[in-house]
Amino acid sequence: MSTIKENLLKVMDQIEKAAQRAGRNPKEIKLVAVSKTVGVDRIKEAIEAGVNILGENYVQEAQKKIEEIGHKVAWHFIGHLQSNKAKVAVRLFDVIHSIDSLPLAQELNRRAEREGRRVKVMIEVNLSGETTKFGVEEGKALSLAKDMMLLNHLSLEGLMTMPPYFDSPEMSRPYFIHLRELKKRIEKEGILIKELSMGMSNDFEVAIEEGATYIRVGTAIFGPRK
Ligand SMILES: *Cc1c(COP(=O)(O)O)cnc(C)c1O
């Protein structure tokens, strides 16, 4: 068995156990295999092993891979998106996890309209206040969500967050709880938020316990990045 397949089986087992601990159906949790810096051959190996959603951080890097591999799998964009890449992003990606401003949302909406598409997106929330992180401040998430309701070619699917890196996954838990509560507050205003995109290699089990519906896992599947 290939290492990627072994890694994937291990992650899937961890997903199932974390879901059981939380009394959740493991099928509610969708695994985004994060393939930034990973070459096409190893991505194909992951697809053969059962991966059906790939997550990429850079538009140009993803474009080459998507041309070669195609759309038999879903491609999600999880990195910071610049408005000047919106046009390509709308063509390439099934879901964009990282909307962090109204101008970006508006540009994607314009591009999606021209393509005759409705693009699934999520709002990235910066809960730690770290200036090195992208994402909207928590206090601005609701008003961004409201403004996005007026953009008919975007479908707001969920919220995404990335806590600071901690060695102990338990340290991420308050951030995951926080995102879940923010989702509730937005829903109280009549805006349905289906998805919570949270949890990476080191803390996805905790994220699942706190309600993640998408986890974004790179290293635990593909090994350390160079
Ligand atoms: C790279 C990346 C991941 C995956 O990180 P790992 O620790 O390798 O699992 C998840 N989400 C985002 C936004 C990333 O940039």
Image (spheres, rainbow, N blue to C red):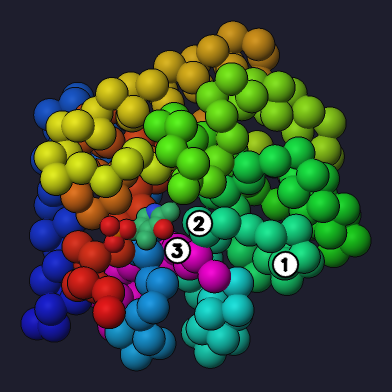
On the image, which quarter does residue 116 sit in? bottom right
Magenta span covers which residues? 45-58
Q: Secondary structure at mark 2?
A: loop
Q: Nearer the viewer, residue 161 or 30?
A: 161
Q: Which residue in the protein does label 3 denote?
A: 55
Q: x, y percentage for residue 86?
A: 74, 62
Confirm or reject: label 2 Cβ below 8 Å from ligand 1: yes
| Mark 3 vs 2, N-terminal side | 3
Residue at image x 41%, y 72%?
A: 36
Q: x, y percentage for residue 14?
A: 13, 48
| Mark 2 vs 1, N-terminal side | 2
Depth check, mark 3 against mark 1: the one in front is 1
Amino acid on which disc 3 is placed: Gly
Alpha carbons under labels 2 and 1: distance apart: 13 Å
Marks 3/2 in contact by CB < 8 Å: the verdict is: yes
Confirm or reject: label 3 Cβ below 8 Å from ligand 1: yes
Residue at image x 14%, y 67%?
A: 7
10 Å neighbourhood of mark 1: few (<14), some, or many (≥20)?
some
| Mark 3 vs 1, N-terminal side | 3
Q: Which residue in the protein does label 1 denote?
A: 85
Q: Which residue in the protein does label 2 denote?
A: 78
Residue 56 is covered by the magenta coloring: yes
Alpha carbons under labels 3 and 1: distance apart: 16 Å
Amino acid on which disc 2 is placed: Ile
Q: Secondary structure at mark 1?
A: helix
